[in-house]
Amino acid sequence: MKNNLVTGAAGFIGSKLVSELIRQNNTVYALIEKGDIKSRDLLLSIDPGIRVIEDFDYMLENFNEYPQFDRIFHLATVGVRPDFNDIELICDVNIKMGCRLIDFARNNRSGVFVNFGSCFEYGDHGDILLTEDIECRPESLYAISKNASTNLVTAYAKTKQVNMITVRPFGVFGEGEGSNRLAPSVIRKCLNREIIKTTPGEQIRDFVNVKDLVRAVIMLSEAAYTPYEIYNICSDNPVSVKSFIKEIVEVCGLDINLVDFGSIPYRQNEAMIFAGNNSKLQKLIEYPFPDNHREGILDIYNCIKNEE
């Protein structure tokens, strides 16, 4: 049984990571915002034994009150929405918080610090699969802040001699994702017999079930990784958006005639290929990513049906 600290623990990925850690008989301390009753209730519904931490500053100042953590998973982040432009909050959460946690990890004598970066740090590189050593060209405030965090937190961890790696997830989908995301919105509209207006769907993406993501990250944290390195978390199974939508409709037994491909244009500067190469990860863990998306699609479909 290992002691784990998870920040951003009640988020889409964080809650699934917490669930998987509990399933594997780990102890979990979950950091959330002070007074966030909804997040507290969500976490305790996963397991009443989860230790919920609401006061970040208190935790930092009183590190000796906590067990020595075998792993710290840092997922807390803000600004994913394109219209989010609170630069002070972006800097505080996406950049400064990571460095403050490095200080905590050093004082706590923690094991590995797993920093969650973002595939959007890479930016658009045309028609190639993205590798960890490629030049980053982030464009949005979110992507720029995440890339700055990766660089700064890694350098700071080295100076503090804190064992650290960064993971960059690609195309995460599955149970618990926002209702406005692609898979849930397609399923909901089809169930309501609404016409779904979409682009021609020629964009190439790597859609990764959130359950596979968290299992792969946990395996990586226990593998013979190289400290301070970056690892893509992707399935190495890039598909077109159109084929993904067709798979959603087929798996759920919905009506493909409700999908109007090509009825809306691509976004300006749309990246037509945005997928990663996972060979660096697979050399360490050989994770069996599936060659289809059935499990994640059915998880979303069953959640939606259970809400009705």
Image (cartoon, rainbow, N blue to C red):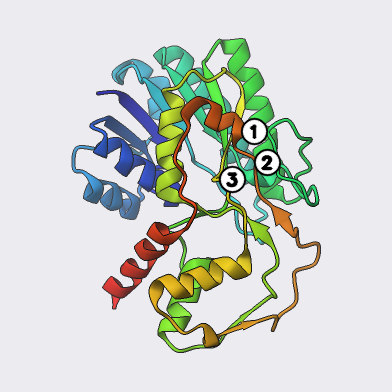
Do the residues bearing badges 2 and 1 touch, measured as CB atoms within 8 Å?
Answer: yes
Q: Is residue 251 above or below residue 90?
A: below
The residue at 49%/52% (across/down) is: 291
Residues at marks 2 and 1, CA–CA distance in whole angstroms: 6 Å
The residue at 76%/35% (across/down) is: 134
Do the residues bearing badges 2 and 3 touch, measured as CB atoms within 8 Å?
Answer: no
Residue denoted by label 2: 145
Which amino acid, mark 2?
Ser
Q: Nearer the viewer, residue 122 or 33?
A: 122
Q: Is residue 6 above or below residue 194?
A: above
Q: Earlier in the sequence, mark 1 or mark 3?
A: 1
Residue at the left extreme of this rendering: 48
Which amino acid, mark 3?
Asp
Picture disc at residue 256: none
Disc 1 packing (10 Å; few <14; some 14–19; many ≥20):
many
The residue at 60%/29% (across/down) is: 280
Where residue 147 sits in the image (x, y, percent)? Answer: 69, 37
Q: Taking 230 as reference, is 6 left or right?
A: left
Any part of residue 8 in sight: no
Residues at marks 2 and 3, CA–CA distance in whole angstroms: 26 Å
Residue denoted by label 1: 149
Residues at marks 1 and 3, CA–CA distance in whole angstroms: 25 Å
Residue denoted by label 3: 236
Q: Quadrant of the N terminus?
A: top left
